[in-house]
Image (tube, grey):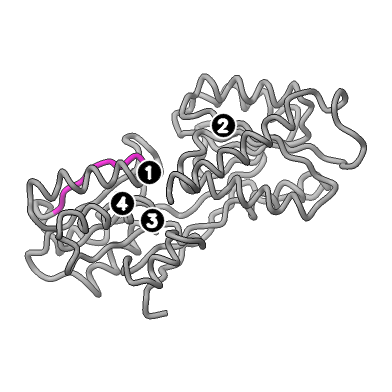
Amino acid sequence: MRRVRRKAAMIVLCCLLLAGCGRKSDIYTDSYQYLIGVSLTNVMEPWLNNLVQVLSERQKEDTDVNIIFRDAAGSPEKQIQDIEALMASGIDLLIVSPDGSGDLDGELEEVSEKIPVVMAGVGSKTDCYTSLIQADDEKIGRLAGEYILENLYEEGDRIMVIEGVEGSPISEKRRKGFLDAIQARIPQEKIVYDYGDWLRDQAELRMKDYLVSHDQADIVFAFNDEMAYGAFLACQQYRAADGVHLIGVDGFEGESAGLNLVERGILDATIQSPDFGSMAYDVALALLHGKETAHNITIEPQLITGNE
């Protein structure tokens, strides 16, 4: 099912890419007023996959707007090229999700002098954006830690934490918030950290590695719901799923997404992070219509449990 959904999302993305391959004045009619470019660091990350879907759905409701998507597939060099291609297409506004490395800063500084830039997910070391939309990632980690302490943890429990990509600012903030919440009560030697690269299959492999070494995990906190589900699948295959408590992050709707996994009792909880797609679209429209928007926007996460 995961491969089918991702393949469908990629087909949608490819169609959108093909629809926006030339300059606005060359291939577009006057049926819309604004052209938005979207530059993604890697559409395989679930929250960016969701961003594509939400922006695409919102655009269908607005005949004044057209959107061109570009996926850098994890390459900062390609993302710079993508942004240059979007600018050559005559976009009126750029929505961009950097990887947090700062490699795009020089390019974005040049772009921001010409058109509005809406940055989503990860910030920049420079002031090269019009509006930045972020989750409170430290609070996400802290909410997970507090929930574990208050509802799940018993002395001696073994905990597996599955982070995203090594070096990711989002992962680092979530880990810091988690540690701030639990370190006074849970011995660090009882916690194992590993990286699942935000992907279900990678998290499944890392969870299997853990089970080979430790036989059983009592609590798993994964930094997104996809990885939490991967951990669950690994526990099932190794007949170690009974009694394991799983917590994820994202809280998207859809089959095998976070809200569904909580409803089915697979996850004990998910921390619902912001709907970056709708927020980015609303901010973009406001800017295109000449309105002012906040320079920095932080959206509060919400804990969702099976008891709600």
| Location of the C terminus (image quadrant) | bottom left
Mark 3 nearby-residue class (10 Å; few <14, some 14–19, many ≥20): many
Q: Are marks 4 and 2 in contact (CB under 8 Å)?
A: no
Q: Which residue is mark 3?
A: 225
Highlighted magenta segment, given as a residue range: 191-199
Does residue 41 sit above or below 262 in this rendering?
above
Q: Residue at x 78, y 34 (%)?
A: 92
Q: Are marks 4 and 3 in contact (CB under 8 Å)?
A: no
The amino acid type of the residue labelled 4 equals Gly
The amino acid type of the residue labelled 2 equals Asp
Residue 48: % across, % down: 52, 44
Is residue 32 in the magenta section? no
Q: CA distance from mark 4 to mark 2?
A: 24 Å
Rendering quarter of residue 259: bottom left
What secondary structure is marked by label 1?
A: loop
Rendering quarter of residue 246: bottom left
Q: Which residue is mark 4?
A: 230
Q: CA distance from mark 2 to mark 1?
A: 16 Å
Q: Which residue is mark 2?
A: 71
Q: Residue at x 62, y 27 (%)?
A: 108
